[in-house]
Image (cartoon, helix red, strand yellow):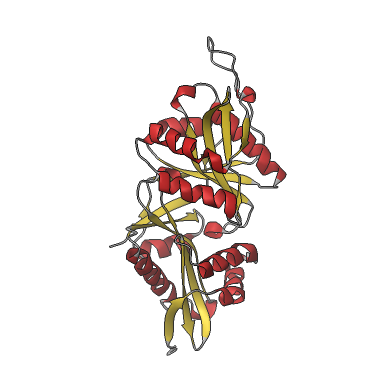
Amino acid sequence: MGTRREMRSLRPEDLDRVIAIDQAVTGRARRGFFAKRLAALSAGPEGLTGVAAEGDGKLVGYALAGVLDGEFGGQAPVGVLHAIGVDRAVARQGVASALAAALEGLLADRGVREIRTEADWAEHDLAAFFSATGYRLSRRLVLSRPAGDLVEEPPPSGTEEFTWEQVPVRSMAEGDLPAIVQVDRKITGRDRTAYYQRKAAEVLHQSGVRVSLVAEIDRQFAGFLMARVDLGEFGRTEPTAVMDTLGVHPAFAGKHVGRALMRQLLLNLGSLRVEQVVTQVEWDHFDLLRFLARTGFGLSQRLSFEKPIP
């Protein structure tokens, strides 16, 4: 109502105000999630960006996004809207739309041409906002499974009796990077060294909890899985692991490497008291969808949205 609003960069000192706005909507204080993101913004990483709306010297809204470049099999950098919130006192005054537009402008300046996000199917107001601001349903499926035991299926008749319990699995180390890049190149036909260098840095040096694993057979590199544990992305309030990269060396196809990696991931997550694992898959990646279905994944109650950025 006549209040002048300005857009500016989101800053670490905005933390308490951001938490208060978010808590009014979600009913929970996601301090750990926002504290880590705002601190990372201050450090200036390439993967994060945030904007704030200010009126009369007070923060009244925020939007926070990351950039993915290779996760979930992607071939081009995409923006990911992690969180957006507006003070209820200024609801329906165009603040959220202005925040979204400002965030998309920053992403476009960095060469990003698409932005994605998620919402629970029952979050009708949020889905309506996405629709009104140009988002559409994505071709990507959001899959999930409880972080419980992985039950072994009996091997098909006539196959070897080599089981996933016989595949050694260990934590990923910095020296695994060349083998990871090589396996990925055999699978995708692309050299994604830069992507895996960034992922390895996250695994080994950043504060987020990563649960990333390597499988070996006869001391040979057989496959890898990358996941992270987070609380707060896309409005989630339960402890969740996000599995974003999985690869098995073609020479070890049929040796149950993927199942061994998944089993160890679930064991590790149990010790962290994580409740569920989520991932995203293109709807027509049928082999991967079959593998995930066999290991307990199914359609989640979340929808994936996407929007081109001019």
Q: Residue at image x 44%, y 61%?
A: 46
**179 or 164, which lies in front?**
179
Q: Is residue 253 visible?
A: no
Relative to 83, 23 lies left or right: right
Quadrant for the N terminus, please. Answer: bottom left
Q: Residue at image x 53%, y 75%?
A: 11
In the image, residue 164 sits, relative to residue 293, either above or below, namely above
Residue placed farthest to the left in the image? 310
Q: Is residue 271 visible?
A: yes
Q: Position of residue 34 (x, y in %)?
A: 58, 66
Q: Residue at image x 53%, y 51%?
A: 201
Q: Residue at image x 55%, y 68%?
A: 38
In the image, residue 245 sits, relative to residue 5, either above or below, namely above
Q: Position of residue 231 (x, y in %)?
A: 61, 56
In the image, residue 91 sits, relative to residue 177, either above or below, namely below
Relative to 260, 302 lies left or right: left
Q: Position of residue 285 (x, y in %)?
A: 40, 35
In the image, residue 61 sits, relative to residue 292, either above or below, namely below
**76 or 95, which lies in front?**
76
Quarter occupied by residue 226: top right
Residue placed farthest to the front in the image? 175
Quarter occupied by residue 101: bottom left
Residue placed farthest to the top in the image? 158
Q: Position of residue 245 (x, y in %)?
A: 49, 41
Relative to 36, 111 lies left or right: left
Quadrant for the C terminus, please. Answer: bottom left
Total residue callouts: 0
Relative to 191, 223 lies left or right: right
